[in-house]
Image: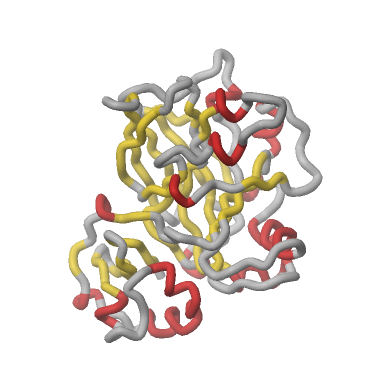
Amino acid sequence: MRIANLAGRAVIVVDDRAVDVFEASEGRFGPELQSLYESWDELRDWAATAKPSAGEPLDVARLGAPSPAPSQTFAIGLNYRAHALESGQKVPDDLTVFTKFASSFLGPIGTIALPEGGSTDWEIELVAVMGRGGRQIAEADAWDHVAGLTIGQDLSERALQMRGGVPQFSLAKSFEGFSPMGPWLVTVDELGDPDDLELSSAINGETVQRSRTSDLVFSVPQIISRLSEIVELHPGDVIFTGTPEGVGFGMSPQRYLQDGDVLTSAIEGIGEMTHVFAEAGA
Protein backbone atom coordinates (compact mmCIF):
# COMPACT_ATOMS: atom_id res chain seq x y z
CA MET A 1 0.00 0.00 0.00
CA ARG A 2 1.06 3.54 -0.75
CA ILE A 3 -0.50 6.27 1.30
CA ALA A 4 0.02 9.98 0.71
CA ASN A 5 -0.88 13.47 1.89
CA LEU A 6 -2.68 15.19 -0.98
CA ALA A 7 -3.23 18.86 -0.15
CA GLY A 8 -3.88 17.95 3.49
CA ARG A 9 -6.12 14.94 2.82
CA ALA A 10 -5.20 11.29 3.22
CA VAL A 11 -5.20 9.31 -0.02
CA ILE A 12 -4.23 5.82 -1.05
CA VAL A 13 -2.24 5.70 -4.29
CA VAL A 14 -3.52 2.93 -6.56
CA ASP A 15 -2.33 2.70 -10.19
CA ASP A 16 -1.32 6.39 -10.26
CA ARG A 17 -4.72 7.42 -8.92
CA ALA A 18 -5.45 9.03 -5.57
CA VAL A 19 -8.30 7.43 -3.61
CA ASP A 20 -9.58 9.83 -0.96
CA VAL A 21 -9.65 7.78 2.25
CA PHE A 22 -12.43 9.70 3.97
CA GLU A 23 -14.77 9.56 0.99
CA ALA A 24 -13.98 5.99 -0.04
CA SER A 25 -14.39 4.71 3.54
CA GLU A 26 -17.63 6.68 3.96
CA GLY A 27 -16.17 8.62 6.86
CA ARG A 28 -14.68 5.68 8.73
CA PHE A 29 -11.10 7.00 8.32
CA GLY A 30 -9.57 10.42 7.74
CA PRO A 31 -9.72 12.93 6.26
CA GLU A 32 -6.44 14.05 7.85
CA LEU A 33 -3.57 11.64 7.29
CA GLN A 34 -2.17 11.93 10.81
CA SER A 35 -5.33 10.44 12.31
CA LEU A 36 -4.91 7.25 10.27
CA TYR A 37 -1.87 6.12 12.23
CA GLU A 38 -4.02 5.78 15.35
CA SER A 39 -5.99 2.98 13.64
CA TRP A 40 -3.34 1.68 11.29
CA ASP A 41 -4.21 -2.04 11.39
CA GLU A 42 -7.89 -1.39 10.66
CA LEU A 43 -6.94 0.99 7.84
CA ARG A 44 -4.74 -1.62 6.16
CA ASP A 45 -7.55 -4.17 6.24
CA TRP A 46 -9.94 -1.69 4.65
CA ALA A 47 -7.41 -0.44 2.09
CA ALA A 48 -7.18 -3.90 0.51
CA THR A 49 -10.71 -3.24 -0.83
CA ALA A 50 -10.05 0.29 -2.22
CA LYS A 51 -10.81 0.62 -5.93
CA PRO A 52 -8.76 2.86 -8.28
CA SER A 53 -11.95 3.90 -10.05
CA ALA A 54 -12.93 5.70 -6.85
CA GLY A 55 -9.96 8.04 -7.18
CA GLU A 56 -8.65 10.84 -9.36
CA PRO A 57 -5.39 11.18 -11.31
CA LEU A 58 -2.58 11.84 -8.84
CA ASP A 59 -0.96 15.29 -8.96
CA VAL A 60 2.43 14.69 -7.30
CA ALA A 61 3.08 18.44 -7.06
CA ARG A 62 0.25 18.71 -4.49
CA LEU A 63 1.67 16.09 -2.12
CA GLY A 64 2.85 16.99 1.37
CA ALA A 65 4.87 15.11 3.98
CA PRO A 66 3.30 11.68 4.63
CA SER A 67 3.34 12.17 8.41
CA PRO A 68 2.84 15.94 8.67
CA ALA A 69 2.30 16.34 12.42
CA PRO A 70 4.01 13.58 14.40
CA SER A 71 4.18 13.72 18.17
CA GLN A 72 7.92 13.03 17.91
CA THR A 73 10.59 13.22 15.23
CA PHE A 74 13.89 11.41 15.71
CA ALA A 75 17.00 11.74 13.56
CA ILE A 76 20.01 9.44 13.79
CA GLY A 77 23.47 10.86 13.13
CA LEU A 78 26.62 9.18 11.80
CA ASN A 79 24.70 5.98 11.03
CA TYR A 80 26.74 4.92 7.98
CA ARG A 81 30.36 4.00 8.59
CA ALA A 82 31.74 5.85 5.57
CA HIS A 83 29.79 8.99 6.48
CA ALA A 84 31.16 8.94 10.03
CA LEU A 85 34.68 8.71 8.64
CA GLU A 86 34.19 11.49 6.06
CA SER A 87 32.90 13.67 8.92
CA GLY A 88 36.08 13.05 10.90
CA GLN A 89 34.24 11.07 13.57
CA LYS A 90 34.48 7.57 14.95
CA VAL A 91 31.80 5.04 14.06
CA PRO A 92 29.39 5.32 17.03
CA ASP A 93 28.78 2.42 19.39
CA ASP A 94 25.32 3.74 20.33
CA LEU A 95 22.66 5.87 18.66
CA THR A 96 23.45 9.55 18.07
CA VAL A 97 19.99 11.14 18.32
CA PHE A 98 18.67 14.65 17.64
CA THR A 99 15.35 16.02 16.38
CA LYS A 100 14.04 17.96 13.40
CA PHE A 101 11.13 20.30 14.03
CA ALA A 102 7.89 19.68 12.13
CA SER A 103 7.77 23.28 10.90
CA SER A 104 10.62 22.29 8.55
CA PHE A 105 8.56 19.54 6.85
CA LEU A 106 7.90 19.79 3.12
CA GLY A 107 6.50 17.54 0.43
CA PRO A 108 8.41 15.79 -2.38
CA ILE A 109 8.42 18.71 -4.84
CA GLY A 110 9.08 22.37 -4.18
CA THR A 111 11.47 25.31 -3.89
CA ILE A 112 13.61 25.70 -0.77
CA ALA A 113 15.13 29.03 0.27
CA LEU A 114 18.83 28.98 1.10
CA PRO A 115 19.48 30.73 4.44
CA GLU A 116 22.35 33.13 4.90
CA GLY A 117 25.60 31.37 5.58
CA GLY A 118 26.11 29.68 2.24
CA SER A 119 26.69 26.22 3.67
CA THR A 120 23.49 24.26 3.12
CA ASP A 121 24.28 20.56 2.75
CA TRP A 122 22.27 17.59 1.47
CA GLU A 123 21.68 14.28 3.27
CA ILE A 124 19.51 11.58 1.66
CA GLU A 125 17.84 9.39 4.29
CA LEU A 126 15.44 6.48 4.59
CA VAL A 127 12.60 7.61 6.86
CA ALA A 128 10.44 5.22 8.89
CA VAL A 129 6.99 6.15 10.18
CA MET A 130 5.53 4.26 13.12
CA GLY A 131 2.18 2.51 12.76
CA ARG A 132 2.14 1.02 16.24
CA GLY A 133 3.71 2.58 19.29
CA GLY A 134 5.03 1.16 22.51
CA ARG A 135 7.93 0.80 24.88
CA GLN A 136 10.52 -1.96 25.05
CA ILE A 137 9.89 -3.07 21.46
CA ALA A 138 11.99 -6.12 20.68
CA GLU A 139 14.24 -5.85 17.64
CA ALA A 140 12.64 -8.99 16.19
CA ASP A 141 9.20 -7.33 16.37
CA ALA A 142 10.17 -3.84 15.23
CA TRP A 143 9.17 -4.10 11.58
CA ASP A 144 5.63 -5.01 12.69
CA HIS A 145 5.45 -1.58 14.36
CA VAL A 146 6.39 0.33 11.18
CA ALA A 147 3.57 1.79 9.09
CA GLY A 148 5.89 2.29 6.14
CA LEU A 149 8.96 3.91 4.68
CA THR A 150 9.50 7.10 2.73
CA ILE A 151 12.31 9.28 1.37
CA GLY A 152 13.73 12.16 3.39
CA GLN A 153 16.39 14.83 3.12
CA ASP A 154 18.07 15.98 6.32
CA LEU A 155 19.17 19.34 4.92
CA SER A 156 21.75 21.01 7.13
CA GLU A 157 23.08 24.56 7.45
CA ARG A 158 26.62 23.65 8.46
CA ALA A 159 27.75 27.11 9.61
CA LEU A 160 25.00 27.20 12.23
CA GLN A 161 25.45 23.54 13.07
CA MET A 162 29.09 24.07 14.05
CA ARG A 163 28.65 27.47 15.72
CA GLY A 164 29.46 27.78 19.41
CA GLY A 165 30.80 25.31 21.92
CA VAL A 166 28.00 22.76 21.38
CA PRO A 167 26.84 21.89 17.84
CA GLN A 168 23.31 23.09 16.99
CA PHE A 169 22.13 19.98 15.19
CA SER A 170 18.37 20.39 15.60
CA LEU A 171 18.14 24.10 14.78
CA ALA A 172 20.61 23.90 11.90
CA LYS A 173 18.52 21.14 10.33
CA SER A 174 15.12 22.77 10.81
CA PHE A 175 14.99 25.83 8.56
CA GLU A 176 11.81 26.11 6.50
CA GLY A 177 11.73 23.25 4.00
CA PHE A 178 14.79 21.51 5.47
CA SER A 179 12.94 18.23 6.11
CA PRO A 180 11.28 17.26 2.83
CA MET A 181 9.67 13.84 2.72
CA GLY A 182 7.74 11.79 0.22
CA PRO A 183 6.41 11.22 -2.24
CA TRP A 184 4.32 8.75 -0.21
CA LEU A 185 4.59 6.14 2.49
CA VAL A 186 5.19 2.60 1.21
CA THR A 187 4.28 -0.33 3.45
CA VAL A 188 7.09 -2.76 4.20
CA ASP A 189 5.42 -5.70 2.45
CA GLU A 190 5.85 -3.94 -0.92
CA LEU A 191 9.62 -3.52 -0.59
CA GLY A 192 11.08 -7.02 -0.81
CA ASP A 193 13.97 -6.66 1.62
CA PRO A 194 13.39 -3.39 3.52
CA ASP A 195 16.83 -3.75 5.13
CA ASP A 196 18.62 -3.45 1.77
CA LEU A 197 17.40 -0.56 -0.39
CA GLU A 198 19.50 1.62 -2.67
CA LEU A 199 19.37 5.35 -1.90
CA SER A 200 20.94 8.26 -3.79
CA SER A 201 21.18 12.03 -4.15
CA ALA A 202 21.95 13.92 -7.35
CA ILE A 203 22.62 17.64 -7.89
CA ASN A 204 21.78 18.91 -11.38
CA GLY A 205 21.98 15.31 -12.59
CA GLU A 206 25.35 14.53 -10.97
CA THR A 207 25.16 11.71 -8.43
CA VAL A 208 26.77 12.76 -5.15
CA GLN A 209 25.48 10.01 -2.85
CA ARG A 210 24.77 6.35 -3.57
CA SER A 211 24.64 3.58 -1.02
CA ARG A 212 22.40 0.87 0.39
CA THR A 213 20.52 0.76 3.67
CA SER A 214 22.25 -2.55 4.41
CA ASP A 215 25.27 -0.33 5.25
CA LEU A 216 23.49 1.28 8.21
CA VAL A 217 25.44 0.97 11.45
CA PHE A 218 22.12 0.56 13.31
CA SER A 219 19.30 -0.95 11.25
CA VAL A 220 15.71 0.29 11.39
CA PRO A 221 14.71 -2.50 13.85
CA GLN A 222 17.73 -1.75 16.03
CA ILE A 223 16.90 1.97 16.05
CA ILE A 224 13.29 1.35 17.06
CA SER A 225 14.25 -1.15 19.74
CA ARG A 226 16.89 1.16 21.23
CA LEU A 227 14.69 4.28 21.18
CA SER A 228 11.80 2.42 22.80
CA GLU A 229 14.03 1.39 25.70
CA ILE A 230 14.03 5.07 26.71
CA VAL A 231 10.96 6.79 25.23
CA GLU A 232 7.47 5.67 24.33
CA LEU A 233 6.99 5.64 20.57
CA HIS A 234 3.64 6.76 19.16
CA PRO A 235 1.77 6.01 15.91
CA GLY A 236 2.88 8.51 13.27
CA ASP A 237 6.27 9.20 14.85
CA VAL A 238 8.96 9.92 12.24
CA ILE A 239 12.47 8.48 12.28
CA PHE A 240 15.20 9.81 9.96
CA THR A 241 17.66 6.90 9.94
CA GLY A 242 20.90 8.59 8.82
CA THR A 243 22.74 9.50 5.64
CA PRO A 244 25.53 7.73 3.72
CA GLU A 245 28.78 9.24 2.52
CA GLY A 246 28.91 11.91 -0.16
CA VAL A 247 27.74 15.03 1.68
CA GLY A 248 29.24 18.41 0.81
CA PHE A 249 30.79 18.89 4.25
CA GLY A 250 33.02 15.85 3.68
CA MET A 251 34.30 16.93 0.25
CA SER A 252 37.62 18.61 -0.40
CA PRO A 253 37.03 21.42 -1.14
CA GLN A 254 33.70 21.48 0.63
CA ARG A 255 30.67 21.92 -1.61
CA TYR A 256 27.26 23.33 -0.72
CA LEU A 257 23.95 23.92 -2.46
CA GLN A 258 23.75 27.02 -4.64
CA ASP A 259 21.01 29.20 -6.10
CA GLY A 260 19.30 27.28 -8.91
CA ASP A 261 20.57 23.82 -7.91
CA VAL A 262 18.15 20.94 -8.42
CA LEU A 263 18.40 18.16 -5.84
CA THR A 264 16.94 14.77 -6.73
CA SER A 265 16.55 12.21 -3.95
CA ALA A 266 15.67 8.58 -4.69
CA ILE A 267 15.18 5.31 -2.83
CA GLU A 268 14.63 1.95 -4.47
CA GLY A 269 11.01 0.80 -4.34
CA ILE A 270 9.73 4.14 -3.04
CA GLY A 271 10.35 6.74 -5.75
CA GLU A 272 12.02 10.13 -5.87
CA MET A 273 11.77 13.77 -4.79
CA THR A 274 12.88 16.91 -6.62
CA HIS A 275 13.66 20.24 -4.97
CA VAL A 276 15.02 23.51 -6.37
CA PHE A 277 17.09 25.86 -4.23
CA ALA A 278 16.90 29.63 -4.37
CA GLU A 279 18.58 32.50 -2.56
CA ALA A 280 16.42 33.91 0.20
CA GLY A 281 14.21 36.66 -1.16
CA ALA A 282 14.76 35.65 -4.78
Name the foreground residue: 49 vs 157: 157
- The vertical placement of 206 against 24, above or below, is above
The image quadrant that residue 270 belongs to is bottom left
Q: How many marks?
A: 0
- Residue found 55% across the figure and 38% down from its top: 171
Which quadrant would the N terminus be assigned to in this image? bottom left
Q: Residue furthest right?
A: 93
Judge whether residue 192 can be spotted in this image: no
Expressed as whole percent of the image width and height from the top left, the position of residue 49 reads 34, 84
Name the foreground residue: 217 vs 230: 230
Name the foreground residue: 193 vs 73: 73
Q: Residue furthest front?
A: 164
- The vertical placement of 173 against 279, above or below, is below
Name the foreground residue: 125 vs 205: 125
Q: Residue furthest top?
A: 253
- Residue found 50% across the figure and 76% down from its top: 38
Which quadrant would the C terminus be assigned to in this image? top left
Please state if 253 lies on the left or on the right of 7 as rendered. Answer: right
Expressed as whole percent of the image width and height from the top left, the position of residue 186 reads 44, 63
The image quadrant that residue 275 belongs to is top left
- The vertical placement of 215 against 1, above or below, is above
- Residue found 47% across the figure and 56% down from its top: 150
Expressed as whole percent of the image width and height from the top left, the position of residue 182 reads 40, 53
- The vertical placement of 15 against 158, above or below, is below
Judge whether residue 76 can be spotted in this image: yes
- Residue found 58% across the figure and 73% down from its top: 132
Q: How is the image coloured?
A: secondary structure
Expressed as whole percent of the image width and height from the top left, the position of residue 125 reads 53, 45
